[in-house]
């Protein structure tokens, strides 16, 4: 499938990757993750646009704008995963194929991280594989878009 446009959204504090809790999140920077996604996107003939914000409303605005500009969304909602109904509603409303990713295995961490309010509106979730979660998530999202188009 060619000519796809994918929006990658990163939530709060992911701009600090590389410096932030390296035992938990590794030494990769967000820039490195974005570059890996852009490269993998090229291989899959998809244009990947990456965006990070520390602000819930900014992410909601971006999702609302995405509806007619992108074919799918890959998101690491970061801490918003666990409580943001606003983000979940925006993702449901935009109706784009969605894959949720996390660097860490959220099910092996503190109890508050074990629940995602986003997963119910996602086509799939990948977590615990570090930066590979994102790359695998991108591949899965492109597969999902293909399936939706066939329906
Ligand atoms: C995270 C997990 C969240 O619980 C946390 O708040 C993050 C990062 C992850 O990628 O592992 O900021 O989404």
Image: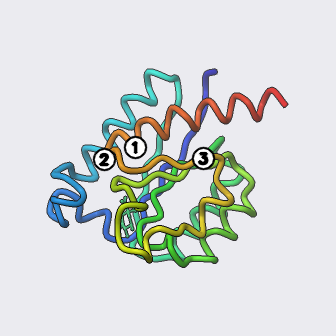
Residue 53: image x %, image y %?
41, 68
Ligand 1 contact, mark 1 (Cβ < 8 Å): yes
- Labels 3 & 2 near each other (Cβ < 8 A): no
Q: Report helix, strand or loop for mark 1.
A: helix
Residue located at (80% from left, 26% from top): 150
- In-front residue for pair 125/18: 125
Q: Which of 98 and 9 is in front in this view?
A: 98
**Residue placed under numbered mark 2 in the picture:** 130
Residue labelled with disc 3 = 124
Secondary element at image label 3: strand
Query: Based on the displayed image, in which of its 4 quarters is residue 151 positioned?
Result: top right
Q: In which quarter of the image is the N terminus?
A: top right
The quadrant where residue 63 appears? bottom right
The answer to whether residue 60 is above or below residue 76 is below
- Residue at the spot 31% in from the left edge and 39% down from the top edge: 35
Task: Pinpoint residue 140: horizontal percent, then vertical percent.
Answer: 55, 35
Residue 46 coordinates in the image, percent (x, y): 53, 30
Which numbered tag is attached to residue 133? Answer: 1
Q: In this view, does 46 lie to the left or right of 37?
A: right
Ligand 1 lies in quarter: bottom left
């Amino acid at each position: 499938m060619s000519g796809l446009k994918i929006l990658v959204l990163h939530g709060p504090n992911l701009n600090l990757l590389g410096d932030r809790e390296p035992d938990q999140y590794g030494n990769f920077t967000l820039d490195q993750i974005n570059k890996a996604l852009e490269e993998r996107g090229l291989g899959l003939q998809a244009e990947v646009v990456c965006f990070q914000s520390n602000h819930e409303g900014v992410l909601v605005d971006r999702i609302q704008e995405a509806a007619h500009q992108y074919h799918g969304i890959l998101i690491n909602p970061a801490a918003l995963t666990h409580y943001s109904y606003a983000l979940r509603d925006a993702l449901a409303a935009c109706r784009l194929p969605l894959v949720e990713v996390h660097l860490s295995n959220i099910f092996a961490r503190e109890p508050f991280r074990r629940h995602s309010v986003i997963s119910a509106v996602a086509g799939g979730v990948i977590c615990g594989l570090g930066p590979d979660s994102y790359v695998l998530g991108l591949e899965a999202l492109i597969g999902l878009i293909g399936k939706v188009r066939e329906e």
